[in-house]
Amino acid sequence: MLQLQTVARIQSDFQTKFGIPRQSNLVKGLKATIVFEEAFRNPDVIRGLEDFSHCWLIWGFSENMAKNWSPTVRPPRLGGNERRGVFATRSPFRPNPLGLSSLPIDSIELHPTLGPLIHVLGADLMDGTPIYDIKPYIPYADAHADAVGGFARQAPDNKLQVLVPEALRHALPVAVWPVVEELLSLDPRPAYQEDPSRIYGMLFRGYELRFSVEEKVLTLREVIPDGEEKD
């Protein structure tokens, strides 16, 4: 049986999987870093990668390892009410819990102790996610202008309106707000939840963002440093 070896891990701003965009590149302002495991911290492992603009990551749904898979799943894109075959979706609950992401390379750095670091944008991975392989994105082979996207033909266009009270604007750095608002507009809630009285909590960059949603409006209620007691 093939055994996969973790070659790197991602450093991202998501401490939990709740709130992570359901696909890569939906929030292009997200920044993350690929940090190699000690055995792979040789600069030669990425020699030439600087000539490519994007890379593929093959990674593990590490939070779902112990969960069972089903032949059919309910894609959030279909409202969580219709079933599709597991191999016709990108559900994390798979026989082999592997994820695939194509990401822009922002920069490559040679760190004195951590070795080569790959800084990427738009990552849809939780902090600490194991990466099993990295491959360059090759436009002539990997881009298909005539591709058909099934039930996901277009990027989501049903974004929420995000309301941030002025009293909360000081809670995060000014430069972070565009990314936070873009993340929240994608509606982090499970597709089947529509309770306007419910308060949700999403961890991002060491803060819990607490919000509610009514109709198509998401209202941010609190921004709490992670670990601080809540009322």
Image: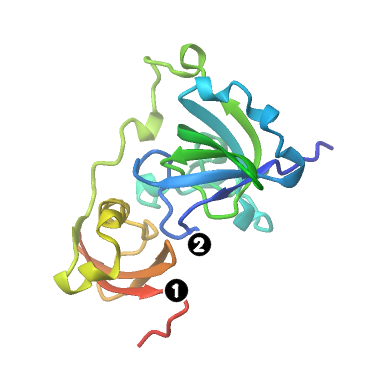
Badge 1 density bin: few <14, some 14–19, many ≥20, Cα 10 Å = some
Residue 150 vs 59, above or below: the answer is above
The scheme the figure's colours follow is rainbow
**Disc 1/disc 2 C-alpha distance (Å):** 10 Å
Q: Are marks 1 and 2 in contact (CB under 8 Å)?
A: yes
Horizontal placement of 120 versus 162: left or right?
Answer: right
Residue 171, given in percent of the width and then of the height, sits at 28, 70
Horizontal placement of 14 versus 45: left or right?
Answer: left
Q: Which residue is mark 2?
A: 15
Q: Circle 2 — which element? A: loop
Residue 135, given in percent of the width and then of the height, sits at 60, 27
Residue 169 vs 49, above or below: the answer is below
From the image, which quarter does the N terminus lie in? top right
Three-letter code for the amino acid on which mark 1 is drawn: Asp
Q: Is residue 69 visible?
A: yes
Q: Nearer the viewer, residue 227 or 217?
A: 227
Horizontal placement of 145 versus 72: left or right?
Answer: left
Residue at position x 57%, y 24% in the image: 49
Q: Is residue 98 visible?
A: no
Q: Which residue is mark 1?
A: 226
